[in-house]
Amino acid sequence: MIEIQHASKTFEQRTGGGFTAIDDVTLTIGRGEFVSLLGPSGCGKSTLLNLVAGFERTTQGSVQVNGQPVTGPGPDRVVVFQEHALFPWLTVLENVAFGLKQKGVGKKERNERAMEQIRTVHLSKFADRYPHELSGGMKQRAAIARALAMDPDILLMDEPFAALDEQTRLILHKELEEIWMKTRKTILFITHNIREAVILSDRVLVMSTRPGRIKKEFAVKAARPRDAADSVLHHVEQAVMEALADELEKVVKEEMGDEYSIKKNDLSNRSADSLGGGI
Amino acid sequence: MLQTLHAFRDGLMDGNLLAATLGSIRRLLISFVISIVVGTTLGFLFARYRLVDDTIGFIVVALQTVPSIAWLPFAIIWFGLNDVAVIFITTLGATWTMALSSRTGIKNIPPIYLRAAQTMGTGTGARMFFQVMVPAAFPHMMTGLRVAWAFAWRALVAGELIAKGAGLGQLLQDGRNLGDTATMLCIVIIIAVLGTISDAYFFKRMEDKLLVRYGLATAGKS
Ligand SMILES: Nc1ncnc2c1ncn2[C@@H]1O[C@H](COP(=O)(O)OP(=O)(O)OP(=O)(O)O)[C@@H](O)[C@H]1O
Ligand SMILES: [Mg+2]
């Protein structure tokens, strides 16, 4: 369980003064819940995730995981990054076993447990390869296996599929959902893709920008495993899109001046899929 | 030329040449190991602690510009005309380069690796250093290693010219005393050949292999 209470994060700027990336965010993510964060670029999604991961400290407020305040990174909250972050000097197997090695698990056992995770993400044939010998999708799979091998309570995923092509991404959605249904990990998932957020999550949080706040949340009450054609998903998607369109307009206005405006109808009428990737 | 070959044969026969070569290589290896350990540790400290970098790091940059043979007179006063003095200056020759290249290597590690490692429980101490920082900085350190090796080689021969003990430099000096240019040329050739072989067959190979393994080069099929 993740509990964020009135958390704010202000970065010192080199030019002097502070920049408030996150302002007074209160948020609870229950055990086993799959929650997505959506929002315009620069609204503070990664910052929020980094607070939970322990890479950054809150300026105000608190972040607790399972009742304990977060004081630094730890193996109970593993992060899957947009850029896989696999170690290039280790094979897939060694990468996946790396965390277990840190826990002091013996070589034979950790290789067995790593192989099990590698099978889960369908990479058995590639266990002996080095990361640069894998495709983008395979690397991301390996990164997920590496995270799963730690058997953390919480998975923090920062745009894990953003760099992948559409087909690979759809396959990974299925796989991630299966993994989640099997393991019931708590997942905090950041994405720019509305469709991805809606199809995967129990709850979608839309953030507003400058300062970063949680603007709105949407529960996705659709049956699992999710079916892309489900009309419930479609409705939530529409609603999320509207909420985001307001935010986007705000950002665009700030950057380009007041004369520019996105017509709301323009946005909503276009196909949901093509818009999803473009935020 | 023929004389040189003769000198080579004679040297091999009476075992002088072999003993000298082995003596030199032994000193070189001892120095090299010390400079790798000390240099990498220093480099890590520079990369990690700003204060150390601004103070000792600055001194090291300055020291690097001093040819290590310049320390030989000091070494002779401190240690005498012996092995230790030679090993000392050979080590100095390689250490600074190692320190600076591992510093750069460690500073250039993508932060995402360090973050990933921390979430997997390496902490920020020894395990992080040996299992993540060193391998991540390795391609860069490898380049430093090659340069350090070349520096060490030079300092070694220079040191041996003056100090006592069986070594190629000493043999060169003996040759001079006897006016035996054939032997001297023979030794210079040995030095060049050993330097080339160690670079081409060890360092270059290791570097190429590493680059391929790290996905930094596309040599051959991957
Ligand atoms: N270390 C830092 N120092 C100063 N400012 C920072 C720092 N990290 C982030 N910021 C600022 O905080 C804001 C939020 O950044 P963050 O990375 O959380 O955005 P994001 O929502 O993840 O964006 P994106 O969708 O593009 O990844 C940005 O305006 C960014 O410039
Ligand atoms: Mg981000």
Image: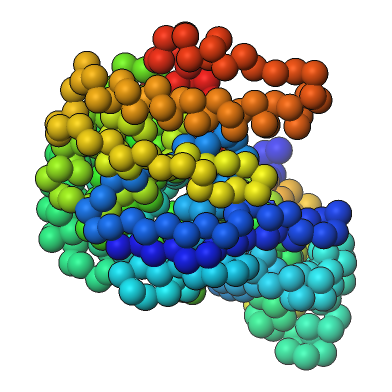
Quadrant assignment for the N terminus of chain B: top right
Task: Please determine whether, in this image, residue A58 is positioned above or below residue A145.
Answer: below
In the rendered image, the vertical position of residue A23 relative to residue B170, given as above or below: above
Residue at coordinates 54% horizontally, 12% vertically from top-left? A265
Q: B104 or A49, which lies in front?
A: A49
Q: In the rendering, at what x and y percent does residue B54 appear?
A: 81, 71
Provide residue A8's location: percent of width, then percent of height.
Answer: 59, 62
Q: Position of residue B62 (x, y in %)?
A: 87, 67
| Residue A130 seen in render | no
The colour scheme is rainbow
| B89 on left or right of A85 | right
Rendered location of residue B188, percent (x, y): 71, 50
Q: Residue at x 40, y 69 (%)?
A: A64
Relative to A106, is A91 on the left or the right?
Answer: right
Q: Quadrant of residue B149?
A: bottom right
Q: Residue at x 12, y 45 (%)?
A: A182
| Residue at x 73%, y 27% (from the top left corner) | A253
Count of residue discs: 0
